[in-house]
Amino acid sequence: MKIEKHCSHLKVKSMDENRKNYLNKLNLLKTDELYEYFDFPPLSIIGEASIFIEKLTKEVSPEQIFSELTEDYETQSIFRKENTFLALSLLTRIADDKNKQKIINWLFDRKEGILNQLNTAETTILRLTRKQFIIRLYPKLRMEIMAELKNAPEIIKFVDAPSTLDATLPIEVLLHERQFRQLKDMDGSSLVRLNTELLIVEKNIETQFQEAYKNLLENESQIGGYEWYGYNGKHYAFRNILINTGLLKWSDQS
């Protein structure tokens, strides 16, 4: 038990140190460089979006920030929308009363996460990719990682062990970036047709996915992973962002 507690402590310490270094890196970036990070999934409330807002409010007004972040919202990727939503939620803490209410109204109008045709197809691809990885790649990668860890130092085995998720997540993000560019060039009917075809594929592998999902190790899954993105044309993350930033209470989610 003491060894387990010590390993847990070392894991947390390692994560804290890595996060501290990452935030220090972000703080050195300019606002336009930080905005490029909006194309990737937000890691937490304190991160890319919060530092972006902190820096940008020193340069331009909350009203202008709101306008610039929302002007292309309908064609933003799901990751950029999450970051936009988070940034605007944090902006309400700084904006004057008039602009604060305007931003809150905009956010609450979209809190249910009803997706347009572009984001519906995008999230279906994200789900399908993750499910196929879990079914086909994870078992093989898991065995390879376990084999490599046999002769690894104890600190690596128990504190900083690599996982299948670590290995495949960068690939998923890269694939998403390429796929989303292609989706943006498609018209509405083509997006609907593609999504219909993908949903059939997803349905056909669902039983395999559920079985494989039961066998995931603790470090192979993530809260709100891509395998849950955009179910039934809705995305849960927007409501969660409002809750996590204090704009919406768990007890008052109407």
Image (cartoon, rainbow, N blue to C red):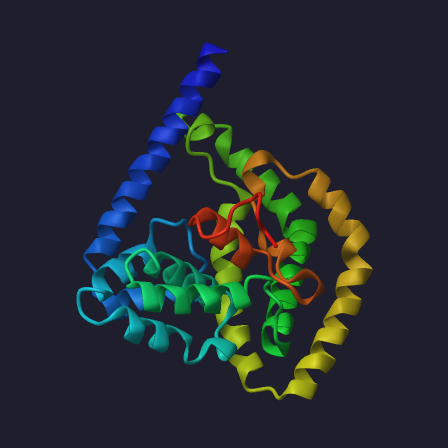
Number of dots carrying numbers: 0
Instruction: Say left or right for 69 vs 27.
Output: right
Where in the figure is residue 198, as x and y percent of width and height? 73, 70
Q: Residue at x 66, y 81 (%)?
A: 191
Instruction: Say left or right for 216 vs 173.
Output: right
Where in the figure is residue 162, as x and y percent of width and height? 47, 39
Instruction: Say left or right for 233 vs 2.
Output: right
Instruction: Say left or right for 4 vs 55.
Output: right
Relative to 168, residue 128 above or below = below
Quadrant where the C terminus lies? bottom right
Relative to 99, residue 251 above or below = above
* Residue farthest along the top direction in this orientation: 2
Residue 99: image quadrant is: bottom left
Q: Residue at x 65, y 86 (%)?
A: 188
> In the image shown, does 83 or 16 lie closer to the viewer?
83
Q: Residue at x 59, y 77 (%)?
A: 118
Relative to 24, residue 111 above or below = below
Where in the figure is residue 244, as x and y percent of width and height? 46, 47
Where in the figure is residue 120, as x and y percent of width and height? 64, 71
* Residue farthest along the front direction in this orientation: 97
> In the image shown, does 70 or 102 lie closer to the viewer?
102
> In the image shown, does 164 or 232 lie closer to the viewer?
232
Q: Residue at x 59, y 45 (%)?
A: 141
